[in-house]
Amino acid sequence: MPRFHYRAFDAAGKSENGEIDALSAAEAYRRLRERGLQPAKVTEVGGSTSAPRKSSPAREGTQGGPLPKLNTKQLLFFTEELAELLEAGLQLEGALRVIEQRQEKSSLKPVAADLRRQVREGVGFSVALRNCGRSFDPLYCNLVAAGEAAGALPQILKRQCEHLEMVGELGRKVTSALVYPAIVFSSAIVLMFIFLTFLVPQLSVLLGKSGQKLPVITQALISVSLFFAHWWWAVVIVIGLIAAGLKTWMETPSGKAGWHRAQLDVPVIGAVLRARFFAEFTQNLSTLVSNGVAMLASMELMKGATGNVFLKGLLERVTEMIREGSSLSGALRKTGFFPPVLLDILGVGEQTGDLAGALTRAAKRYDRELSGRIQYLTTLIQPAVILIVALFVGIVAYSMISGILSSVNALRAH
């Protein structure tokens, strides 16, 4: 009989490692849950892990053929319907069966059928999601794992619905705000291309015949035009090499962490990313704690549900400090990243014995802050793009007009 090595958490949140005999990884998961443990990783001795992994996009469904990838709208619909069915009292397998048996043709049906088959075989729902191709990202799967551990899967799914709706709404707002600036920006690029390719060379010949010294800004424009006319291929190669180098750097652990850290410091956008992290962190941690999951186990699950490498490193440090006996607010304070207001709210919650309530209040606060920052971002995009375009076009136009006027004045003087 195959033997599996496992890592799991008990009801108190204490990590436990060991080995278990089972016919399959699914049976190993089932036996561990029967013993009151929450499996985090199950690996066949001498085999490969059955825990979180990247699944092949060509994974076959129950009817044969690759499973379709759900788009954002389908994923939101699936998550929302599943949460409502679970809240109505259906078990997970029954809820998936309802989605599978829908009359209309949809990509949801084969995905739900495959998930239902895995759940019936005893595979944990979060593991089944990971096995289901690219429809469910690691953040989604880890939050579902947290919901399973807390016995609060419907609440976690509803939170995921809010997150997906927020991402979709942000995308629609940004797209709407960028339509007009994109048209202006495209027109400006075409106009500048015409200027630099056709008008500026002709202007340089005309002004050169006057024999007059051109203004510095006009001479700079002519030099740039001549450079791009002769060395455009070199510019393309340099840009390609820089892009390839950045991509290679960002694929390294240090580069990825540095890029994720830099995102949080970008003006305006960084504030949105921070507010989003604080809102998700406090809301999901509140759900776990209020449903009886120990703080150490909750932090392990939150760490896995964080996609930003830099933030994941912070949560790893926080988890280690909590394991050594530190309080949550104390551990967060030592990182130097979390805002004082959040630390004060959590500190009061720990003193009063109502940490879950404090986390919920903090989540509502950062939800409001996130909405405000998103509105500010979408309001700022349009005038910022138009201002940049106007600046470049204005510089080119001023350079040309300045050169023409300088030559005309010189001719008049003669």
Image (tube, helix red, strand yellow):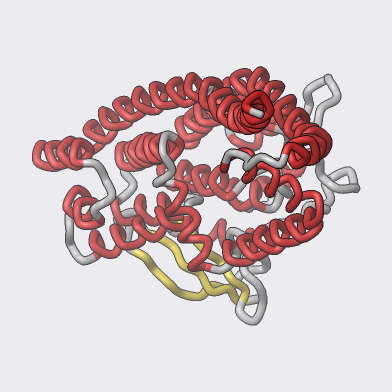
All told, the count of numbered labels is 0
**Rendering coords of residue 14 (x, y %):** 32, 62
**Front position in the image: 194 or 291:** 194
Residue 6 in sight: yes
Residue at horizontal 69 percent and vertical 49 percent from the top: 223
Q: Tell me, yes or no, if residue 77 can be seen here.
A: no
Given residues 126 and 37, the one toward you in this image is 126
Where is the C terminus found, in terms of image quarters? top right
Pick the front one: 62 or 327: 327
User: What residue appears at the point 34 percent right and 47 percent down from the top-left corner?
Assistant: 293
Instruction: Return the residue found at the far front.
Output: 414
Q: List the single residue furthest toward the right.
A: 64
Q: Work out whether 308 lies above or below 102.
A: below
Residue 38, compared with residue 389, is above or below; it is: below
- Where the N terminus falls, by quadrant? bottom right
Residue name at image x 62 percent, y 45 percent: 220
